[in-house]
């Protein structure tokens, strides 16, 4: 924490100081702490209202099984099966396989293998929410935005 305190400016100062460099980078940004990695991962906001941490769950090459009793990523929540679903990572293309259980991507039910895209929100079971981050895909998407343009938001149509 000393590295955090050493590099702070006055109130409202926007400094960036590297706290930890490695597979998981921690960057102090003034009033916040930025956590980033170069590998695809899920971000979990915890398992309920009493949780005070966020968790980054790496999605390595191959198959990652997710569920209440899964060997790879074990999550708890209403409606989660022991082996609820799995995510397959084949050379940077990640696909969610629901295994017949309740899964949705950006609020839409998923019943067959579906490719995950940067920033999509997964809901497993009734209320286990995870955000999918794919740093390489995000970098490519940013490069496609014209100078001064805005990043596209999730698909939305009024009245739906």
Image (tube, helix red, strand yellow):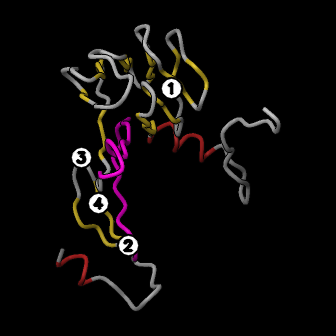
Q: Position of residue 89 (x, y in %)?
A: 37, 20
Which comes before the other along the chain, label 1 or label 3? 3
Number of dots carrying numbers: 4
Q: Is 26 placed above or below 40 here? A: below
How far apart are labels 3 and 4 at the CA level? Answer: 10 Å
How far apart are labels 3 and 2 at the CA level? Answer: 18 Å
Q: Position of residue 101 (x, y in %)?
A: 43, 13
Which mark, by number, is residue 16? 2
Which residue is under mark 4? 26
Mark 4, Cα crowd under 10 Å, few <14 / some 14-19 / many 20+, is some
Please give left or right for residue 82 compared with residue 33 in the image: left
Residue at left 40%, top 78%?
15
Q: Position of residue 119 (x, y in %)?
A: 52, 40
Q: Main secondary structure of the magenta part?
A: loop
Give the residues in magenta: 31-50
Mark 3 residue element: loop
Identify the image quadrant of the C terminus: top right
Which mark, by number, is residue 23? 3
Q: Residue furthest bottom?
A: 10
Q: Is 47 in front, or is 21?
A: 47
Q: Is 147 in front, or is 36?
A: 36
Q: Position of residue 121 (x, y in %)?
A: 51, 36
């Amino acid at each position: 924490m000393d590295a955090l305190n050493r590099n702070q400016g006055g109130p409202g100062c926007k400094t960036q100081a590297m706290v930890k460099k490695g597979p998981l980078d921690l960057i102090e940004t003034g009033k916040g702490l930025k956590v980033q990695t170069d590998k695809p991962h899920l971000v979990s906001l915890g398992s309920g209202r009493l949780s005070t941490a966020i968790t980054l769950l790496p999605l390595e090459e191959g198959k990652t099984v997710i569920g209440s009793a899964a060997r790879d990523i074990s999550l708890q929540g209403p409606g989660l099966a022991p082996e609820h679903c799995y995510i397959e990572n084949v050379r940077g293309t990640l696909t969610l396989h629901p295994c017949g259980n309740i899964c949705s991507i950006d609020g839409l039910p998923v019943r067959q293998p579906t490719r995950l895209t940067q920033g999509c929100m997964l809901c497993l079971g009734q209320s286990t929410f995870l955000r999918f981050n794919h740093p390489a895909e995000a970098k490519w998407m940013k490069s496609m935005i014209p100078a001064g343009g805005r990043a596209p938001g999730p698909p939305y149509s009024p009245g739906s």
